[in-house]
Image (cartoon, rainbow, N blue to C red):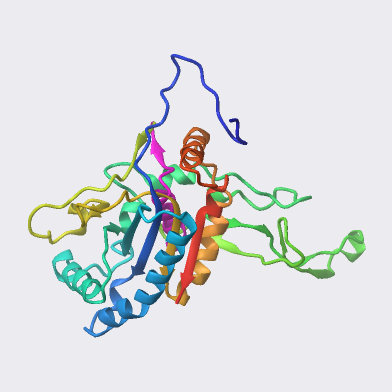
Amino acid sequence: MTRPGTAFWEAGGDPRPASVALSHVSIELGHLYFEDFQGDPARLPQYFREIRPWAEAARTALLSELGDRRARISTCFLMDDYFGPTPSPRDVLPPVLEAAERAGLTIDYLARESGCAEADGVPLAELVHERIVADPPPETNGSRPPAKESGWLSNGQRGGASAARAGAAMASLRQWEPPVENGAARHSVFIDVELRGRGKWSCAYLASVWQLLRLGVLRHNGAAVAQPREWDGPLPEDWAQLPPVMRLSPRAQPFSAYRTVSVLGERFLPTEHAVRTILGQILVDPQVNAAILDRADAEGLRLPIQVVDRLRYLFV
């Protein structure tokens, strides 16, 4: 079947992008910063006890929706080693994994947030940045630089004071205009998202790359990126020595999935709103997207064409 955005290529041209194994659903069990649990050993166990009922509810709902007890469901956890401070993995990972296990949760994959910026020598954040498609508001004059230059991405037109359209004699008068969301449904919800500042990618932007990794849609020169690897031996002192995505359970279902579910604290709601805004303006490789849609069809799954519509959340 032919889908919107499907690409066609000639024999002898570029090879088809590599495929990756896919679960039905990837459940994120958390995205924590080191300061979230430093200084209070009770905070980690409490965190996992609080999210367990929600994670179980998500799993139960997904099993019911899929109608198959053999559903492929994997879990993941994202650690911030990008913004710092960054204590050693030897000090951080054992208590995290122990607290999750005591709460009855299994973390199949652990990922480093810096791996969303660069993984195994591949500049993932830059690759995604090049796939931003401008979404200018109607009747704009181009005075606002594009997101690739400004480091800011918007879902509409910023409001504020604007010059009155009354000729030169009235040019000093300013008239307030409200912000307007592109394609607003009844009322506007305007958002301006910082992608990069002070030499670092923003949390919302890296979280967008994280979602794309979980959905299995990123490629570099046709090859899969940030593929999970196991770690053998003692934990290192430096986070950069660990794989960008580390497989913790040898029996885990695939890391990437047709859909993602993120169980997060309420404080992440604004960030994930920004993530959805960013992903709504990212052009995913049409060949990769078409192949995933066809695989979903073959499994009897109805998958949204737009990747942003494959994300679900539980804020606790």
Is 80 positioned to the left or the right of 170 in the image?
left
Residues 164 and 45: in front is 45
Residues 144 and 298: in front is 298
At which x and y percent is residue 138? Answer: 76, 50
Q: Report which quarter residue 263 is drawn in.
A: bottom left
**Is residue 197 in sight in this rendering?**
no
The N terminus lies in quadrant: top right
Identify the magenta region: 202-221
Magenta residue check for 35: no
Looking at the image, residue 52 lies above or below residue 297: below
Which residue is most to the left? 233
Identify which residue is drawn at 42% across, 27% down: 16
Residues 59 and 313: in front is 59
**Is residue 225 in sight in this rendering?**
yes
Looking at the image, residue 24 lies above or below residue 62: above
The C terminus lies in quadrant: bottom left
At which x and y percent is residue 136? Answer: 68, 49
Is 314 positioned to the left or the right of 41 in the image?
right
Residues 168 and 207: in front is 207
Is 311 positioned to the left or the right of 186 in the image?
left
Magenta residue check for 211: yes
At which x and y percent is residue 189? Answer: 67, 67
Identify which residue is drawn at 58% across, 49% down: 281
Identify which residue is drawn at 46% across, 45% down: 128
Q: What predominant SS class does the magenta segment belong to?
A: helix
Looking at the image, residue 223 lies above or below residue 167: above
At which x and y percent is residue 10? Answer: 50, 16
Image label count: 0
